[in-house]
Amino acid sequence: MLVLAIWLGGCAAPVAAPTVPPATESGATRLTVTVSDGGCSLGPEGTSSLAAGPIELVSVNETDARAAVDLWRLTEGGTFDELAAHVDDERADAEAGGPGLGHPGFVTGQISSGIVEPGSTTTVDGTVQAGTHAIVCLRHFEAVTTDPFRPFATLGPLEAE
């Protein structure tokens, strides 16, 4: 019994490989982003990387307000943590009815769902370039009179190779 305990104690837990969503019949990577009152979630669960190339972005809006989902690529010198902090600041500004902080200079928009009406689903096709990406969820803020669609959550980072 002691030998078994020593043997098991010496075993390291396996390191999980990045989760890559399976390809669709067309060969595109399918990502599903669900916008809910509690935030955003990404499926398949555990997704941390993508194959560079064709993508199918499925946006599900479970809220009573209009929403949107974007896939942004971080450019040289930008980090996911910086983007997440910017989106947090943007959300706080929108909740206060502020004018907005603007698009951060270290990201490029690659794919956008467009407006996803309450209770509906939208699917768009696009192409993902190699690099670090983030999902940015946007929603309509009642307190904002100009450009009421503002970021409120980020998911990622997602590495595309």
Image (spheres, rainbow, N blue to C red):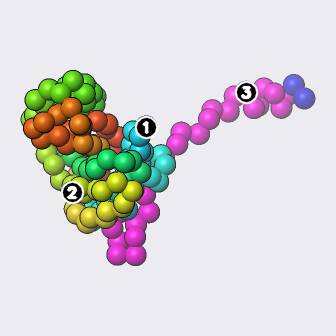
Disc count in the image? 3
Q: How crowded is mark 3: few (under 14 residues within 10 Å), some or many (20 or more)?
A: few
At 33% from the left and 67% from the top, the residue drawn is 28
Residue position marked by numbered label 3 in the rendering: 9
The residues colored magenta run 3-29
At 68% from the left and 33% from the top, the residue drawn is 11
The answer to whether residue 74 is magenta is: no
Pointer 3 or 2: first along the chain: 3
Q: Which amino acid does label 3 sit on?
A: Gly
Q: Which of 131 and 113 is in front in this view?
A: 113
The spot of residue 44 in percent (x, y) is 47, 54
Gap between marks 3 and 1 measured at Cα:
40 Å
Q: Residues within 10 Å of mark 2 (few under 14, many from 20)?
A: some
Residue 29 is drawn in which quadrant? bottom left
The secondary structure that dominates the magenta segment is loop
* In the displayed structure image, the side of residue 127 where residue 25 appears, left or right: right
Element class at badge 1: loop
- Do the numbered discs 3 and 2 sit on residues whose CB atoms are within 8 Å? no
Q: How crowded is mark 1: few (under 14 residues within 10 Å), some or many (20 or more)?
A: few
Residue position marked by numbered label 1 in the rendering: 38
Which mark lies nearer to you, 3 or 2?
2
Question: From the image, which quarter does the N terminus lie in?
Answer: top right
Q: Which amino acid does label 1 sit on?
A: Gly
Disc ID at residue 114: 2
Q: Which of 22 and 95 is in front in this view?
A: 95
